[in-house]
Amino acid sequence: ALAQDSTEARSGAPTKSSSPDPLGVRDTLHLNVESTGENSWMVDVACYNDEELFGLSIPLRFTSGLRRVYIDSTIFTGGRVDYFQVKLARADTAIQRLTIGLIAALSPDAKVLDSGNGSLAKVYLHAEGEGKGLKVDTTTTAPQNSLLFIYSDMKDGNLQIKIFPEVVI
């Protein structure tokens, strides 16, 4: 569940597991780290989902040894959620955390995230001082944000929301 800048990017959909997602194949978050300079990185936040998603909660933590990590920007343009009406990225450098919140729209007829595989956002960051590498992992952030994939379903004209914790690679 930990991504590092030395980790090779993984692609493709996961296979059926012994603890399946009740909706089908387990949906998966991918955190792919690329170096963009001596002390700077880009983290591609991507996911595989086999059902349509209404929203996502993605809290991340960053570490680089004893160095402080600074989150410079989070870019959604060109990603799978580019058209979502709510795209939030709350950076907290003091605790080296980033919370990404995504909601398709605030109406039941909103265009949701189709099933598929690919990038949701790109996070750019840097660290100051001597050191090597960046580690990224999921975490929880206040107030009780955890990794969640949010599914919607219309039943009898009412919007039904289903929330499941997911897997990180």
Image: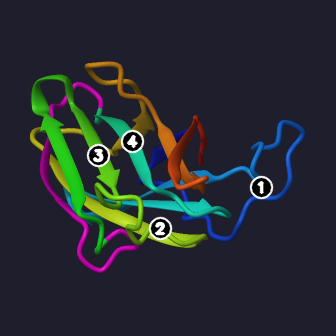
Give the residue type at disc 2.
Answer: Leu
Q: Residue at x 45, y 67 (%)?
A: 112
Label placed on residue 25: 1
Q: Nearer the viewer, residue 50 or 120?
A: 50
Q: Which residues are magenta?
A: 65-81
Closer to viewer: mark 2 or mark 3: 2
Query: Mark 1 or 4 closer to N-term?
Result: 1
Q: Residues within 10 Å of mark 4 (few under 14, many from 20)?
A: some
Q: Is residue 105 left or right of residue 159?
A: left
Secondary structure at badge 3 equals strand
Amino acid at the residue labelled 3? Ile
- Residue depicted at 41% across the width and 28% down the height: 139
Alpha-carbon span between mark 4 and mark 3: 6 Å
Sequence-first tag of 1 and 3: 1
| Secondary structure at numbered mark 4 | strand
Tell me if residue 94 comes above or below residue 130 in the rendering: above
The reply to whether callout 4 and callout 3 are in contact (CB within 8 Å) is: yes
Report which residue position mark 3 lands on: 100
Does residue 111 belong to the magenta stretch?
no
* Residue that numbered label 2 is attached to: 113
Instruction: Give residue 89's position: percent from left, percent from top.
Output: 20, 48
Residue 60 location in percent, x, y?
A: 35, 37
